[in-house]
Amino acid sequence: MNRELLFDLLQIPSPSGHEERMKAFLVKYLDVHGIKAQDLGPAGLSWGLGEGDKLAFFSVHIDQVAFVADRIDDEGYIYLKMPGIDPRIAPSQELTVRGKRELVGVVGMRPPHFLSEEEQKAPIPSEKLYVDVGLPGEEVKRLVPVGTVCTWRLEPLALLGSRVTGVGLDNKAGVFLALLVTEALGSKKLPGRIRFFASTQEEGVMFGAGFAGRSAYKSGESVLFAVVVDTTFGTDHEVKDSAFPLGKGSTLGVGPILSKSHLAIMRSIASELSIPYSLEPLTSFTGTEADVLSISGKGIPTILLSIPLRNMHSPVEIVDLDDVESSLKLLSAALQREDLWSS
Amino acid sequence: MELLKQLCDAPGVSGHEDAVREILIKAVGSYAESVHVDSLGNLFMTKGKGKKGPHLMFTAHTDEVGLMVERIDDEGFIKFMTLGGIDPRVLPAKRVRIGKDAICGVIGIKPFHLSDKEERKEVTPLSDLRVDIGASSRSETERFVDVGDPIWFDTLFEQQGDILKAKAFDDRAGCYMMAELIKHEFRFPATFVWSVQEEMGLRGGRIAAARVRPDIMIVLEGTGACDLPTDADVARRPFLGKGPVITILDRTVVANQRLVELLCQTAERDGIPWQFKRPLVGGTDAGAAVRVKALGAAVVAIPARYIHTPVALAHLKDIINTIELVKAAAERLREVKL
Amino acid sequence: MNKEVLQELCRVFGPTGRESRVAEIVKTHLEGTNLEVTADVLGNVIARKGDGPYPVFCTHLDQPGWVVEHRDKKGFLHLKSVPADEKLGEGWAVDEGGNRYRVFKESDGKSWRAESLVEGEGEMGTFLVPKAEFEASKGAYFATALADRVGAALLLDIAGKANKGNQAVSLVCYTGRHLKFTGLTAALEDLDIERLYLIEALPCDEGNEGYSLGEGPVILLRTQHSVAPSLWVDEVAKIASDIGIKLQKGLVSDGESAADTLARTGIQAITLGMGVRYSGSRIERVEGSDCEALSKLLQGLAKGKVRS
């Protein structure tokens, strides 16, 4: 598998609302493969495969969680907002502060020498966490406007076997899979058209998916089904419930808001081809773009495939590339099958 | 009453409303000019095409709250999640049915003898409850039950004079009332929508409104009656047996003021008892619909005690009165300017 | 911004769900302009001029208030407030007919109660709002429902100015902001939006908001759940600097905003506003200078040519 592509993706910062660099990378990458992507402005990108009357959506979000500079004090310490991030993982992280100039910063904390015993026991509350870029206050204020995003400075890394760790594997593993599916299907005859969406601001409001659904409704297009690819919780020493093992295939979502009939077809294809997967039971909110797409316009039956991932929304997310590989097989087989397009 | 019994007894946990839909198509499909089912399972029937507007949409939701299989234990017990708002205190020691074969099971509870006093003061958390279908191993359970299968309460409809007992009056009562209303000739084009996934966040109603784009929407509901024992001098409405319950505003929508007035005045004129719903409680498909299109919304409900539990009570006269009120008020729609 | 119009708007009865009197005032003032005005069945007021796509300026009509839920045996009225967590404070309230009520909190500190001054008034379902106050002093406004109505006053300012030019523009006043933005999405449904600007007064009570009272208009880079597109923010900043207005940048995270609600349905918006002190209470304060600067900025944006 083209690991380099995943590692390239992992090195592109793509915080929610600031996905321009990822978009530019994708446009270029697709262009090399002979595919013209359409720029959807703040909503992301889309590109198409296949032809015919039947239309399906395939959506992956390209944004990742990040810290945001909320306030800079007179000494130049940068205080943070951290949407979707556990403040306990912030201390002593290295960050890139993406202001007018990129700055290296560390999330500072008082050493134990200056703390009471009580203070040492409790996590540092988020309002007390700050980034130190080591520059004078005035210079920081000039270089780092309020709203500047700060991302983790960690290069992707191969772990043992087929596992990798990197910043923003949620959902760059999904983006990687979408690109692999695009390549795999590029030369194939498809039962209809697939419109891929590389969507923005999933973390928070699912804006890109909302835009995709709305645009189809507004233009009177009817969408036969949608595939959403995202990540889900991987099991580890601590997380057992509502989590799925790494390396045993992706999960297919099952629940009231997801399409039963499409799920049944996906399952039968998986067992036909001996592709491993887990069933992921989900109630009213899946926390993915499926929530939005399935009820956009006149309703779109939705399939949700998620890659198990450990340590979600931290800088040390881990996925197993075997799961990407098996998902690639499943999705590219399924999308060529007439039965998926006729149910 | 046979149709109401069938509807209440049918399984229809959110996402699995097929049985309810089939019953409705069979029972009243012949009254409709067109019958359509959308990709999520909303059932649409239309009447009065070509008549002069406004275009009227009636909505009742087919789904009920219930449970869903989360995973199967090594010993064959079934861990489950709730679908819709269910108080975990009502779950221990209930009979349920599961999946497409309607397998029987019970939600177990530790024997009284083995639980200590302190333990009995605590509510058993959902994560500790299991359904037992009598299997002795995971593989045995797996032969009958799959992850994601719906689980519903094994409650049967019974009538005792005017008092009705069943599960899922929220909103099979509404489904039933609409089945009666579609037999009526309205002076307007009307679309009847039996929607899905209302308990999952008003999902079916949203896409139904996007498809139908009506001018007026009337939601028929089964809402919680609150005439329950209390010593406090607090609001106890709506009362069982005291007539249709009319919404002013709930947590998702402000009912159209003119439609509310029309309903109240029509009830007064015709001597139909009626009552207001307490403000800012609950939400219906109307909340989703007004966010798709500017439309005049009204919600009329029957009161039912103990909704969102395995067994509820409703009053026959409330159902009859609600049907009558909606018919009579709909006749007068042209008299009001929304 | 016209002080008399603001005063009129702050004084009128218009809780969530009963906004028609506010809508009437807005419509009356729009009548003299060359905008085409429509109202929909949800009570939203939509004014338009020219062909799209046009810039859309959007604010709300409703104010926080109460609804009567129950009359107890002693004759006290039990109220529910909309929204539930509003800091409306004890004191006088009025209903649509102008009847007065003494509103107070039950000893539990949570439940709202009221005593009607007119025997028999206050049936179940009666809507109440705090009795209106309005003062202009020290270059600032102090008023009831000020944060709610200053947006409409600013829109009427744009409408007056739009009269002269021939640029296409749309102004929207929606209902139900305090009930999960009930009217917002439907109000925008048929508009051909080029840029959408939400006008909001932004709480400025704690001193750590990143923007201050009297320091000029505020643009939000980020709301609770969504991010304003930086290209669009830059456009606004450019126009502000061209016309010599100091623009403050802010982030807010106190609950779902109109921008969040819209983003969920695939519509992107920019939130513009000014600081408001004592927000959510009976008497709020905004600075006249902030209003004037924001009004100028909005007119600049209405002239268009922001497309980059």
Image: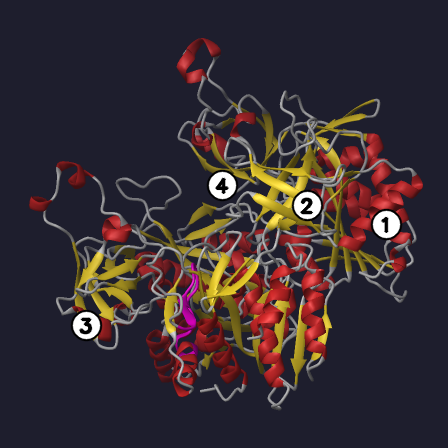
Residue B89 rendering spot, x and y as whole percentages: 53, 26
Q: Earlier in the sequence, mark 1 or mark 4?
A: 4
Q: Nearer the viewer, mark 1 or mark 4?
A: 1
Name the chain letter of the residue that bears numbered label 3.
A
Along the viewing direction, whichever of A204 and A259 lies nearer the viewer: A204
Residue highlighted by disc 4: B147
Name the chain letter of the residue that bears numbered label 4.
B
Residue highlighted by disc 1: B182
For residue A136, which quarter of the picture? bottom left
Does residue C12 lie above or below B248 as drawn? below
For residue C41, which quarter of the picture? bottom right
Residue type for callout 4: Val
- Kindly check if marks 1 and 3 are in contact, taking CB atoms under 8 A apart as contact: no
The local crowd at label 3, few if under 14, some if 14 to 19, many if 20 or more residues have their Cα within 10 Å, is some
Residue at 73% of width from left, 61% of height from top? B295
Residue type for callout 3: Glu
Which region is colored magenta?
Answer: C216-232
Name the chain letter of the residue that bears numbered label 1.
B
Residue highlighted by disc 3: A138
Left or right of residue C272, residue B56 in this image: right
Residue highlighted by disc 2: C100
Left or right of residue A332, residue B242 in this image: right
Along the viewing direction, whichever of A256 and B269 lies nearer the viewer: B269
Does residue B107 lie above or below A295 as drawn? above
Q: CA distance from mark 2 to mark 4?
A: 59 Å
Where is the C terminus of chain A found, in terms of image quarters? bottom right
The local crowd at label 1, few if under 14, some if 14 to 19, many if 20 or more residues have their Cα within 10 Å, is many
In the rendered image, residues at marks 1 and 2 fall on the same chain:
no
